[in-house]
Amino acid sequence: MSKQVNVQSIDTLRQFRASLREYSDAVQDVLDCLQLESQRTVDWVQYDRAAYWRSAVREASDLLKQASTTLEMKQLVIANADRPACTEERKAVQNARRRMRYSEQQVDKIKKLIPALQHEADEFQGVLSKLAQLVESNLPTAMASLDRTIESLTKYTLLQQSSSTNHQIKSSTDLSESPPPDEPSNPNTTTAEPQS
């Protein structure tokens, strides 16, 4: 039993295949970008921020030494009875200590953060690589299937067109070769029926 397929537009399938190819390229670009960004984030924390806070500790240490020295010198220069309160110098020492403690805390936080961040980045990379495998294997398979479908439908429409053309040619040939239709019979004449 043969069934006919009503193929409206193979071009739509071709356009869909082209769009699928563009989608595949776009997804691959996004995956590459995400992988780079996740690694860049880890590198930024591990190298840039770690170096920044170590440098901040050194600067705070230098600032603390300088503030302590300034306070000691001010206290030594003036006799005990005439000694001013040295409030500005004491505040400078306290601020330098706070800054140094804060910078040291940041160094410790980064040391603790780096392994956790690296673990999360590795997990994320794993998910991205699974998605990349899907894109690399499933989308080309889908495009190949579309190619086969387009090819089959193209052959089918060509076959239908040639079959339709052959049928039209045969019909026109049959009409030209057919005998003229019988003349209508005269209602006044009767035909004799054979008697038995």
Image (cartoon, rainbow, N blue to C red):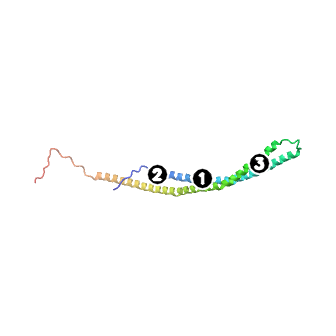
Q: Earlier in the sequence, mark 3 or mark 2?
A: 2
Task: Give the CA separation, mark 3 to mark 1.
Answer: 41 Å
Residue located beneath label 1 in the image: 34
* Residue found 67% across the figure and 54% down from its top: 112
Q: Nearer the viewer, residue 135 or 13?
A: 135
The disc label shown at residue 13, or none: 2
Which residue is painted at 81% across and 42% down in the image?
A: 87
Residue 30 placed where, x, y %? 58, 52
Secondary structure beneath dot 2 equals: helix
The residue carrying pointer 3 sits among few (fewer than 14), some (14 to 19) or many (20 or more) residues within 10 Å by Cα, namely some
Q: Amino acid at mark 1?
A: Leu
Mark 1, Cα crowd under 10 Å, few <14 / some 14-19 / many 20+, is some
Image spot of residue 183 (x, y percent):
21, 47
Q: Is residue 48 visible?
A: no
Q: Please report contact status of discs 3 and 2: CB closer than 8 Å, yes or no.
A: no
Q: Is residue 163 visible?
A: yes
Name which residue lies at 76% across and 49% down. 60
Indicate the position of residue 56 as horizontal and vertical percent values. Answer: 74, 50
